Image (cartoon, rainbow, N blue to C red):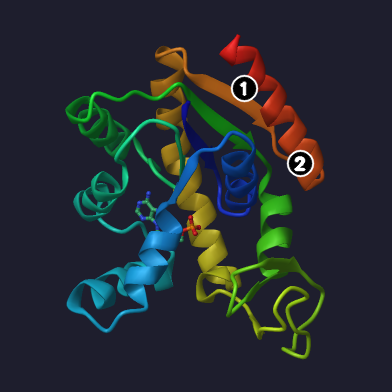
Amino acid sequence: MNIILFGSPGSGKGTQAKMLSEYFKLKRISLGDILREEASKDSDLGKEIKKYMQKGHLVPDGLVSRLIEENIDEEDFILDGYPRNLNQAIKLEEILKRKSLQIDSFIYLDIDEKTVTDRLSKRWVCKKCGANYHLNISSQKYRCDLCKGELVQREDDSPQVIKNRWELFLKENRKLLDFYRSKNKLVEIEGRGSIEEVLRRVKEKLKCQKH
Ligand code: AMP
C-alpha cells in the first residue's frame, strides 16, 4: 500500500500519518521533518531551506523532489507533506515510474481555516522528542509529558506565517485534487473532530479500498 496524505497545515496530517504508518506498517516519509532536519544544519543547503520555511513559502520543487527521491525506496510507504502542488505531483509520477512503484490512494483531510488557525496558534512541540501539544499558554512553563523536554512553538506557526501558509494551500490544492480525482485515487475525509474519529474514518476508507 502506497499512500499520500494531503491536507492544509494544521489539518492533522502529521499525527494521522504517524498513526496510519504504525497501523498499516508503512514507512512514513515526512517532507516537513526531512526539511527541518536539513534546516537545522549549518550547511549552505540548510541555510537555503531555512530561508523559505521561515516565511511559510514552499521550498523549490526541484530541491524537495530530489530529497523525496532519495527517501522512497520500496513498496509500503505513506507520504506526508509531498506533493503540495501540481508540478510536484507530476515529478512524483516520474520518480515512481523510475522505481516501478505507484500510488494507491491520495487521502485529503478536509478542514476549514478557522479550525486550522486555532490549532496552529496553540500548537507546542517538544524540543527533544517532537511530541505535539494543544495548549492555551503563552509561556514555556510546561514540560513534555513523555520525556520532560522543553516545549516550544514552531517559528512558522506565527499568525502572519499561518496566514501565508493557508493562502498558498488554497491556491494549490484544487489543481492537485483534480489531478488525483482524474486518476480515481482521491479519497476525501472530513478532517474535523478528534484524532481518533478522523483516524477511524481514514482506516475504514482504506480497508474498503483494499478489498
Ligand atoms: P509542514 O511541517 O508540512 O507544515 O512543512 C513546513 C514547511 O516546510 C512549509 O511551510 C514549507 O516551507 C516546507 N515544505 C513542506 N513540504 C513542502 C513541499 N512539498 N514543497 C515545498 N516546501 C515544503
Dot 2 crowding, Cα within 10 Å, few <14, some 14–19, many 20+: some
Residue at figure coordinates x 58%, y 51% from the top left: 14
Of residues 36 and 155, the one drawn nearer to the viewer in this rendering: 36
Q: Amino acid at mark 1?
A: Leu
Q: Secondary structure at mark 1?
A: helix
Residue under pointer 1 = 206
Q: CA distance from mark 2 to mark 1?
A: 18 Å
Q: Is mark 1 within 8 Å of ligand 1?
A: no
Residue under pointer 2 = 192
Quarter of the image that includes the C terminus: top right
Dot 1 crowding, Cα within 10 Å, few <14, some 14–19, many 20+: some
Of residues 171 and 146, the one drawn nearer to the viewer in this rendering: 146
Residue at figure coordinates x 66%, y 83% from the top left: 149
Q: Earlier in the sequence, mark 2 or mark 1?
A: 2
Residue 57 lies in quadrant = bottom left
**Image: 159 above or below 175:** below
| Relative side of 43 to 149, left or right | left
State how many labels appear.
Answer: 2
Residue at figure coordinates x 59%, y 33% from the top left: 24
Quarter of the render that holds ligand 1? bottom left
Residue 158 lies in quadrant = bottom right
Residue at figure coordinates x 60%, y 70% from the top left: 159
Measured as percent of width and height from the top left, residue 39 is found at: 34, 73
Residue 175 lies in quadrant = top left
**Image: 58 above or below 193:** below
Measured as percent of width and height from the top left, residue 95 is found at: 22, 34
Measured as percent of width and height from the top left, residue 75 is found at: 38, 30
> Given contact means CB atoms under 8 Å apart, are the residues at marks 2 and 1 in contact?
no
Question: What is the number of the mark on residue 6?
Answer: none
Q: Secondary structure at mark 2?
A: loop
Q: Amino acid at mark 2?
A: Arg
Measured as percent of width and height from the top left, residue 153 is found at: 61, 77
